[in-house]
Image (cartoon, coloured by chain):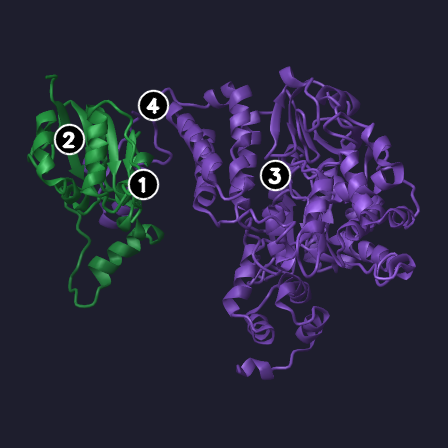
Chain colours: A green, B purple
Amino acid sequence: MSKKLRVATTSLAGCFGCHMSLLDIDERLFPLLDLIEFDRSPLTDIKHCGPCDIGFIEGGICNAENVHVLYEFRKNCKILIAIGSCAITGGLPAQRNHLDLGSCLTEVYLTEPGLEHGHIPNDPELPLPLDKVHPLHEVVKIDYFIPGCPPSGDAIWKFLTDLIAGKTPELGHGLIEYD
Amino acid sequence: MSIFAEVHDDYLDQILARYDHSPFNLLQILREVQEHSGHINTEAVNYLSTRLHIPRVRIEGVATFYSFLHLQPHGEYRVLFSDNITDRMQGSQALMEKMCQQLWLQPGKVSEDGLVSINTTSCTGMCDQGPAMLVNGRAITRLTHQRVQEIGSLIRNRTLLSDWPADFFRVEDNIHRSGPLLDNTIAPGDVLRTALALGGKDIVEAVKNSGLRGRGGAGFPTGLKWEACCNAPGEARHVVCNADEGEPGTFKDRVILTRQADLVFEGMTLCALAVGAQHGYLYLRGEYRYLLEPLQAVLQRRRDNNLLGKNILCQPGFDFDIVIHLGAGAYICGEESALIESLEGKRGVPRNRPPFPVTHGYKQQPTAVDNVETFCSAALVMQMGAEKYRAIGTSKSSGTKLISVSGDCPRPGIYEYPFGVSVRQVLQDCGAVNTRAVQVSGPSGVCVAESEFDRKLGFEDLPTAGAFMVFDDSRDLFEVARNFVHFFAHESCGFCTPCRVGTSMLKSTMDKIAAGLGTKYDLREIERLDHVLQTSSHCGLGRTACNPVLHTLKHFRPAYENRLKLLEFKPAFDLDGALARARQMTGRDDAGAHLKTEGV
């Protein structure tokens, strides 16, 4: 049997819903693990990813740390997949895009009723938010997109098994969802 | 009943009365309301809603669809610079900038005193005498720095548009080559007399035998269309003349309507006789508003001479009349089913086809929709006889075609040729030298490079609605394509997602490449987008929106490649700049508060 494919996954400005959906492949996780092994992923708790075959990212780009992680994935993964609405369009977090970031921060940390002596967090440990939330493909090249919020476990299974088999992934009727 | 019903409003009541209080005339009503008060205010919307018994959202939906209608004030003087690539080549952008400076204005904004606003609009059909603009809907041609400055002063002094120098509004015909259509001297009524002797069936047969095909670009056989309309079951039949000449670079219908209006109406009446229609509509694009009164005068003269109205030419039961309907700045209304929606006073969204307008057109009745030039040609067929007409042109494209030549040549204007003329011949006749490319039939048509100049205009090879834009070797074909892509993104009706989103994405990608941030990846993305647009758009706009890019990529790929980064991918925006607001709000400037944009 050929070498197992290394797969890294992460959630950026997402809700981990797409990862939950990945787990929805249920008992098919076992045959999958015969074919792949996980690198950096919430499932392994590895902090940084090494060279991989497939990178699997949910969520859009909302802050500086997201950019660093995305770059790390792009540099290490031969194939990078954007999964779910947030990764593909910015999704729910991008609803702040029509607001000025400054007024958002002011509203939340300074003028919100009940706040006293509030201040906008400025610890260097915290990543700074970008003025707008971007989908992944606006920051790096993305090779494949799996739409859905979240895509079903079946769609993810079909997509991954196609890729592993060396086929151009095709999600037929019933597997593509946009909501 | 709403309280607004009790409000008595003189000017609105007059407009409503002129249009029979019919929601089918909503677009015309709104256009007149705006001509009266500069914009369509909330009170007017409420009043119309009550009187026409339609919801307010329907009125607002229509008003916001058409770019010449406004629910907000847009200044006493609304200046719109025509933004076709030919206007730009004649220096429109510098003129607009200068005018904005002169009047202390930003493009798109209304001046603080509410006096004036300046913006761009899609091609106004004056490409042979540009740069051109519209002021409160009136076309002004041959703009120069001096003329623009004079216009600025007239606006500042609040001079009434009617008191501006007449020369500003002069529109030339610029006919450089004429043929049977433009040379026509048939007396009004003669064609109809010939036709009456034949009768409906024989008229259709003659048009079929002549091989006449639609002149709007698609080339559907006119005789078959008339026959289908005639045979379709219905309570009433309609004849519609499509004079919504919106394809950038096309202006031949303007010249036909100026010089041969009688022939157009004669052709429409002929069609009415052939299909048994009683109602005719001329859908005139809003940019040609200045033609409305002269055309109405022609219609009135024809009524007075018994060529329109009841019992035409004393033929009992031959009743037909024509109404002119003005568009309001929507390219999509050139598509026949969108045009019919617009005629019915709705947003100009293309219908699902089939059913086609010949069976389910205006008010769901059989409707023959033809181009201005087609009606003229049909009238000529009657006069000349089918055989003689068929002898002109080529075997599959009979007759002549009017070509609107613009761009880099010393003699832009109208040329009437028999079908089958080569691109090279037209270039030679208009005096073009060092020509790099010709855009045939407008942005949705074909970009023809030098190696293909022997291709022939006609349905066998290069079908055309008439536009012929010439680009010499000083022009950058990437910028030409980018202008066309912006045009389609602006004119997409917004109904279907592939076109609404796809044309915008195409525009952003072209802008990214223009800004020097494009990569090979972006070229591949363009090709993918093109595929989506072509295979899944609702109508022809989306399907053809990528043509300018595909054709220029084929012939002028280096114009794109020269702009690309030697990278696989680069973002279109500055990542570090995207953190500036957060840095400002937190007061941070440490290393972690910055990002380096990396190419991949």
Q: Which dot, 4 or 1, sits closer to the camera? A: 1
Q: Are marks 4 and 3 on the same chain?
A: yes
| Coordinates of residue B284 in the picture (x, y in percent) | 71, 51
Look at label 3 and name its amino acid.
Gln
**How far apart are the alpha carbons under marks 4 and 2?**
22 Å
Residue at the spot of label 2: A8
- For label 2, the SS is strand
Label 3: which residue? B93
- Answer above or below: position of B263 versus B597: below
Q: Are marks 2 and 3 on the same chain?
A: no
Sequence-wise, the earlier of marks 2 and 1 is 2
Please give the chain letter of the residue carrying mark 2.
A
- Expressed as whole percent of the image width and height from the top left, the position of residue B473 reads 63, 20
* B98, A142: nearer the viewer: A142
Judging by the rendered image, the residue that carries numbered circle 1 is: A173
Residue matched to label 4 = B568
Chain label for disc 3: B
Residue B241 drawn above or below residue B535: below
Mark 4 vs mark 3: give the one in front: 4
A42 w.r.t. B134: above or below = above
Quarter location, residue B45: bottom right
SS at mark 3?
A: helix
